[in-house]
Image (tube, helix red, strand yellow):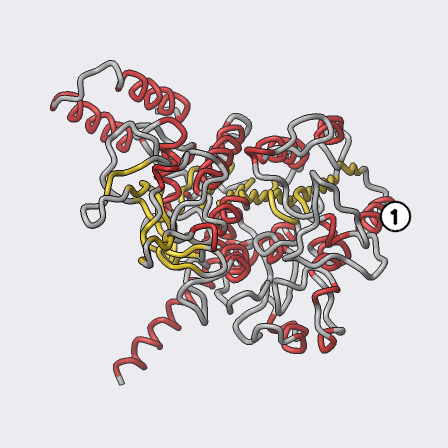
Amino acid sequence: MHVTLIYFTIFFLDFVTHAVKEDSGYWRSKARMEIRRSLSYEWNTNEAKNVIIFVGDGMGPNTITASRIFRSGETSSLAWEDFPHVGLLKTYNTNKQVPDSASTATALFGGIKTNYEVVGVNANVPLRDCEASLNTDNHVESIFSWAQAAGKATGFVTTTRVTHATPAPLYAHSADRKWECESRMPPNATRCKDIARQLIENEPGRNIKVIMGGGRQTLKSNVEATESDPLDAWACSRQDGRDLVDTWKRDKSARKVKFAVAENNEQLRKVDTDQAEYLLGIFANSHISMDWKRDQGPKGQPSLEDMTVKALKILEKSANGYLLVVEGGLIDFAHHRGQAAQALRETVRLSDAVNATLQIIRTEDTLLIVTSDHSHSLAFNGYSDRGTSILGIAQRSKHDNTAYTTLSYSTGGPNNYAYEITNNKAVRVDPSRFDTNEFTYSQQAAIITDEAYHGGCDVAIFAIGPYAHLFHSVHEQNYVAEVVAFASSIGEYGNKENSASIFAVDCILSFGLFLTMLM
C-alpha cells in the first residue's frame, strides 16, 4: 500500500475514534487494520541517494508519549510514529552510564562511542586534553566527511548554536564541547583550534552547503546583546577580533560559488534557492528562542520547519544526493529547566518539520531517520483520566492529600522545588494552586540539583526508506552511522566489493574473539 494512503487511513481511523463506540469490535478492527498495514510493507533495498536524520535532543520515550497527547490526544501520532521500522538505541558512552550530547552525537554521526563531553574524537582523548585531541589517529570522521568524499551535498539545521554539542561532531574534533570559541579555552590549549573556527576554516565544515541555527556570539567578536536576543552567559563569547561570518563569505567568494547569508525571517524568505549553492543562516546570538515566544515577524527567527524546508530546496539540487541533519535542540533546553510544556511544544514542532519533509522527499530513494541522542528525567505519573491535559493534575496523594501533576522530574533546578516549610515542617507544595499548563510553569522534581539532568534509558529510533529495516531491535548508538554509510554507499561502503571484504574480516575477527573467550 502506498505510504500516503497508509497515512490517510490512519488519520481517518483516528478521526472516527471520537464518533465510534470503543467496544470489542472497534479494537479488533483497529488491530486487524494494523496487521494489514504491516503485511503490506516490503523492504526497500534501493541505494539511499539521500539521507535525512532528525535528532530530538533529550527526546526520550516519555517525552514522545507526552508530546503526542499534548498535540491532539492519546490516539494521535507524531509524524514518525507511523514509520514502518522502529528500534532502540543504547545511549551510554565509554565512561558514563548517562551521557551528554557531544559524546552521543559523536556515536550517532561518527560510528564511535567516546568519552563524556568530547567532540569528534575517540576514547583515547580524555576530557580537556588538547594534546591528545591533536593526534589525528584519535579523530573520528563523521558521516559528513564520508558523504562529501562521495560527492554528496551536506547540511545541518539546529535550533541551538551551530557550534553546540550535537552539530559539532559533524565537522569538529575537540577535547571539550565547551571550546566553542577561544574565550573558554585554557592557556594549555592554545595549540587547539576552537569549534567555531573548525566549522568555518577546516574540512568538512567549510564544504557544508547549508548551515542554519544560532550562535552569533561564537562566530563573531564582541556582538551586542539586545532584550530580544541576549548573550548566553553559559557559553563562550568570541573575543579574539575574528568575524567568522565574514571569513565564510570571503571563502565562498574566493571559490567563486554562489552563496547567501540570512539573519532573520525576511532574509531567509528572500534567499533564492535556485541560485544559492551555499547558505549560512545565523539567527540568534545564542540559541534560537523557544518556539512559544519566538518572534515570527520579518525581523524574527525562523521555525525548525522553515529552516528544514529551505535547506532541502538547496540540497535537493545535488545530482549525487545529499545528507541533511536536523536537530530539535530546544527540547533538551526546556527539560534542563524542568519546563515540560516548552519541551512538549518543541517536540511537536520537530514533528511539524518531519511532516513538511515527507511532503517534499521520495522515500523510494531517501532514508529518513528520527531519533534522539539521550533521554531526560521526565516522569509520567498515574493515574489521570483519559482526555485530561497531560500538563494537568493527575490526582491527590493518598499519603498527604496533596495534588501532583501527571508530569514531573526526578531531578531539577531550584525552580522545580517541591517543598516549603509550614509550621517547622517540610510540606510539599500543592501544584493545584498554579496554572500547570503555562509554558513558564516548572514541574516539581524529587531531587534538586542545579538543573534537571539527562536520563540514561534507551531512546527510540524510527526509520522509513532504503534499508530502514536495519533498525529492528536494540542497537548500540554508534550503529546508526554504520547503517547510514551502508544504505547510501559512503565511507567504507562506497565500494561494494570493499563492503563484502569488510563483513568477511569482521566475521573472522568475531570468530577469533569467540575462540579467545573459550580458552
The residue to which callout 1 is attached is 254
Rendered image quadrant of residue 390: top left
- Residue 201, percent from left and from top: 77, 57
Mark 1 belongs to which amino acid?
Ala
The spot of residue 288 in percent (x, y) is 63, 41
Q: Is residue 241 left or right of residue 195?
A: right
Of the 4 image quadrants, the one containing the C terminus is bottom left
Residue at the location (39% across, 43% down)?
Answer: 63
Q: Is residue 471 visible?
A: no
Residue 33 coordinates in the image, percent (x, y): 24, 25
Indicate left or right for 406 with 489 as reference: left
Quadrant in the rendering for residue 405: top left
Q: Position of residue 419 (x, y in %)?
A: 36, 53
Q: On screen, 481 above or below 31?
A: below
Query: Local crowd at mark 1 within 10 Å, few (<14), some, or many (≥20)?
Result: few
> Relative to the observer, which residue lies in front, 232 or 511?
232
Given residues 46 and 401, the one toward you in this image is 401
Q: Secondary structure at mark 1?
A: helix
Residue that sits furthest to the left in the current view: 24
Question: Is 412 situated above or below 291?
Answer: below
Q: Residue at x 52, y 52 (%)?
A: 485
